[in-house]
Each structure stands twice: as structure tokens, then as C-alpha cells.
Image (spheres, rainbow, N blue to C red):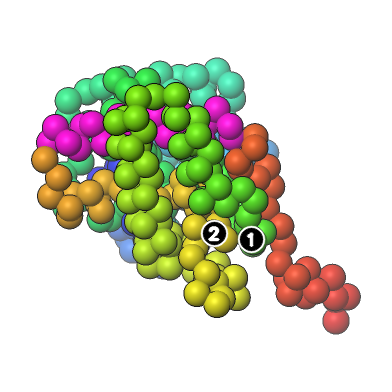
Amino acid sequence: MRGSKTVVSDTDSSATQSDSSATKTDSDMIDGEDEEVSAPSPDSCPFSEGEKVLAFHETQIYEAKVTKVDFKMNEWRFYVHYLGWSKNWDEWVHLDRLMKNTDENVRKQEQLNANQRTHKNAKLPRTSQTKQKGYYAIDLFLPCKYGMDYNFCNKRLVDDCEFITHLGKLVKLPRTPNVDDIMKKYLDYRSKDTLKKTHSVEEILKGLCCYFDKALPVMLLYKNERQQYEKAIAHDASPSSVYGAEHLLRLFVKLPELLLNANIEEETLKDLQQKLVDFLKFLQKNQNAFFLSTYHVPDDVEASTNKPDV
């Protein structure tokens, strides 16, 4: 199920809400069981509602948030939402599945997950990939041997999801630099290569831009971004001239699915992967110039939240 997170697909904002209807367990239905001891004081609970934690799921550790706390069958249990993932993955877990979100534990998480990525059985079959719903995990598509720092990618994607689906913020449009600008800057950066290599890179960038323009309205937007899209894309403007690095990075999560359908030969695909990793490294190197540090609250939301309570 979640032993190794890979390509993600659905961008519906419902991916960030918990579904309490699925939380009943057999123990809820049993009558006449031995009497449980009275629940201890909430102060003795090691984790609290709303607390961000690290949660074990099968062979990896993920960032999560505790959304409910319960004391049942003489032990604490916690309903967690995996950050950046659909509510379909929300679940009840016991104390042995959670860790405090400390620097030391984050280092343990990174080490464990890095070890899992190198394991030959880490990849999920394609049929399982379609269940993943949030923006996360570029690593299996772009193997570690290419030297990419995936913490940069995944942190950006999770923060992006948090801003939009949890905080109700949006990327302010039009973006500067936009996707077209970033592509041009990368081509200039690679212009020192031979003419043949430069032409090859230029063709890949054209294809990437084409993928972006076609994919954005179909699979790169959260539900609460669609109204903004309708307003922003006017007079036949291309998405690549309006959107920036934030949405471009989402495309890299979708590329495995898109390229699988393109029936590219294995050697060609490997070469393409290397060039795409180089482009991601360029985004990372220039992240302060290309990515927003925070998103903005839409005007209509600001107006409604500023109204006095009635």
C-alpha cells in the first residue's frame, strides 16, 4: 500500500480532509467485553490533536498530523493524516507507530527512507500507483544514482500542498519568472555545451513545455485553484506564460505516467531522465529566485474572514 510512495495523481482538495466515517473498528461493536479502566488524564497522552508527527507505515516513515486522539481497550490510539496525501490513507495507529517530529528523528526518517529507495523491491507496481493521491515522491522516477537531492523536491511539494489545501492560499498569478522564462534561463545556462547537446536540450524543453500546457488544467491543479485558472488563462494565453516553478514541479510527479504512455525505448528514457534530473538540479540551485517563499490569500477569502462575527 504505502511501502514506497511513488507517482501521485489526484489533486482534489478533498485529499486533505479526514473521513471519520471509516474509523469504526470491531472493538466499537463488541458488547460485554471486560470493563476498561477509566481513561487517563489527557495530559498523560504523549501526542495531542493537531500535532505534527513522524509515522511508520510498513517500511518507511512519513510526516503526518494527529487529527483525533482516543483511549480504547486500555491504550492510546491516534487518527493520523499523512501530509500531502489523500484522506484515503488516514488511519488509526497505536503509540508504537509514532515518533516526535524532532531533528534527530527526522534524520532517522531520512536515513531509513534513503535505504528503502536503494532496495530493489522498493518500487510499487503501476497498478498500485494510481491509488496515491497527493503531490509527493519524485525519487522512484529519477533514481538516486543521478545525484538528485529529493528532499528539496519533496519539501517543496508538501509545502505547496499545505499552503493551498490546508491554509487556503494560492500562488499569485501571473508568476515572474514564469515557466517559459525558466526554460529560457536553463537553455542559456546550457548554451556552453556543444551545439548538438544544446539542440537536444532545446527539443526536450519544448516537449516539457508542451506537456505542461496540456497537463496543467487536467491534472496539475487542486480543486480550489480552478476558479483562479479560469480567470488567469484568458485570450488564449498558455499556462506556461502564466504559471511558474511551483506548478512546474508538480509536472515532474506526473511525468512517469505520461512517459509510460509514450512508449519510449529504455535507453532513450534513461538519457531523458538524466537530462530531467539536471533540469531539477537547476531549479534547486536557483530555488530562491524561482519559487515563492509564501502564497497569498485570495481577495474574496480575505474579505470574508475580515467580517465581524454575527
Residue that mark 2 sits on: 241
- Alpha carbon distance from label 1 to label 2: 8 Å
Quarter of the figure that contains the N terminus: top left
Q: Are marks 1 and 2 in contact (CB under 8 Å)?
A: yes
Does the magenta stretch mainly form a helix, a strand or a loop? helix
Residue that mark 1 sits on: 174
Residue 96: image location, x then y, percent: 41, 31
With respect to residue 1, does 243 lie above or below? below
Residue 220 within the segment the image draws in magenta: no
Residue 186: image location, x then y, percent: 48, 36
Q: Nearer the viewer, mark 1 or mark 2?
A: 2
Quarter of the figure that contains the C terminus: bottom right
Foreground of the two, 1 or 69: 1
Residue 102: quadrant of the picture: top right
Outermost residue to the right: 308
Q: Residue at x 85, y 75 (%)?
A: 307
